[in-house]
Amino acid sequence: MTEMMKAVRLHEFGGPDVLRYEEAPKPVPASGEVVVCLHAAGLNPPDLYLRDGFRALPPEWRPNPDFPLILGTDISGVVAAVGENVSGVGLGDEVFSMVRFPHDLMTGSNAYADYVKVPVSNLALKPAGISHAHAAGAPMSLLTAWQFLVDVGHEAPNPFQDFNHAPIALEGKTVLVNGAGGGVGHLAVQVAKWKGAHVIAVASARHETVLRDLGADAFIDYTRQAAETVAQDVDLVIDAVGGSDMERFLTVIKTGGALYLVNPLGFSGYEEAAKRGITVSATQVRSNGAQLAEVGRLLGDGTIRVVIDSEFPLPEASAAHSRALKGSIQGKIVLIAK
């Protein structure tokens, strides 16, 4: 007889109201996998895109999955079952993970559930010094910052360009982080600062106190001044916002500098960048348990901190998605299961 659990499932694409908290089959670990009893799950933009059916993409790129789906990739919890050929973790261990991303980008990685099946290669021990909520807020956003700024960590083909992304050395460099108040942005500020950079944070005024506390050396309130009219002689811009007019940052970057685009879709300044001697690069964040263990040490000793915007009980995932759609998020939104 199939054991059941509670999960937030999607039976059709649409707005936050299509998320249903209901009975679902409890997962069983295969070889190389564990099942984690969820304590918290982090929200990320791909969760919103999948719930909406990736409507921003051309029709031929949109998913056509078998419903129901369970959204979510980022988890923190306790190992409840262990499959064969698993080492390094055992029953009762506190762990965190970004689950099977981008492998399950179009179908969901089943994180919004009481129990989540996770490849052990995606898993790391949760830092003892932080809560499950803060651990669940870390994986995708922190791995994105890490793989852009420190170490890509894989040799997979780059879906955004015909060369592999290669992080530049940051010690003594000036780094501007656009969208510094958000999930990726506030962690990129801290990673760049830890690597020895002078960091300029660009966000709205409500984020200034937090970002300075996290290590930003300078702050630009984009609602009062356009960053490209204030900053100059920057070695690296990492844009965590995307959208229109990303090209404007080319004017503030030194010759030989770089522009990193977390969401490069729509960027049209490649020719201009080449004329200016600026490297434009992007990469696709990928699950990596070894990197999570590495960044976990920085989370555990407080070198890097995850800021929580808001917490919602797992059954109220629709309200959490509604909060995300309102924007102006400070850090991460987290679902609490236990």
Image (tube, rainbow, N blue to C red):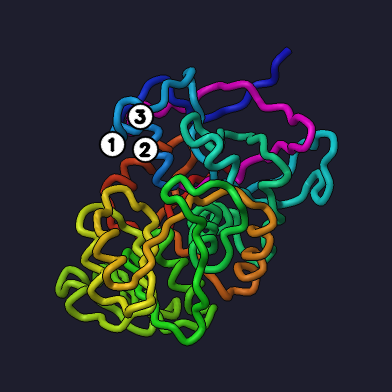
Label 2 sits on residue: 49
Provide the residue span drawn in magenta.
Answer: 16-43
The residue labelled by disc 1 is: 56
* Residue indicated by mark 3: 53
Residue type beneath disc 2: Tyr
For badge 1, the amino acid type reads Ala
Task: Indicate left or right for 171 with 30 as reference.
Answer: left
Q: Residue at x 31, y 27 (%)?
A: 14
Give the label, 1 or 2, closer to the camera.
1
- Helix, strand or loop at label 2? It is helix
Residue at 56% across, 49% down: 286
Residue 261, compared with residue 90, is above or below; it is: below
Q: What residue do we see at 64% from left, 59% from top?
A: 291
Q: Camera-side residue: 206 or 248?
A: 248
**Is there any visible trace of residue 115 in the rendered image?**
yes
Label 2 crowd bin: few (<14), some (14–19), many (20+), radius 10 Å: some
Q: Locate the N terminus and report the quarter of the image it occupies.
A: top right
In this rendering, position of residue 119 left or right of residue 39:
right
Say whether marks 1 and 2 touch (CB < 8 Å).
Answer: yes
Q: CA distance from mark 3 to mark 2?
A: 6 Å
Is 95 magenta? The answer is no
* Residue in view at x 38 percent, y 67 percent: 279
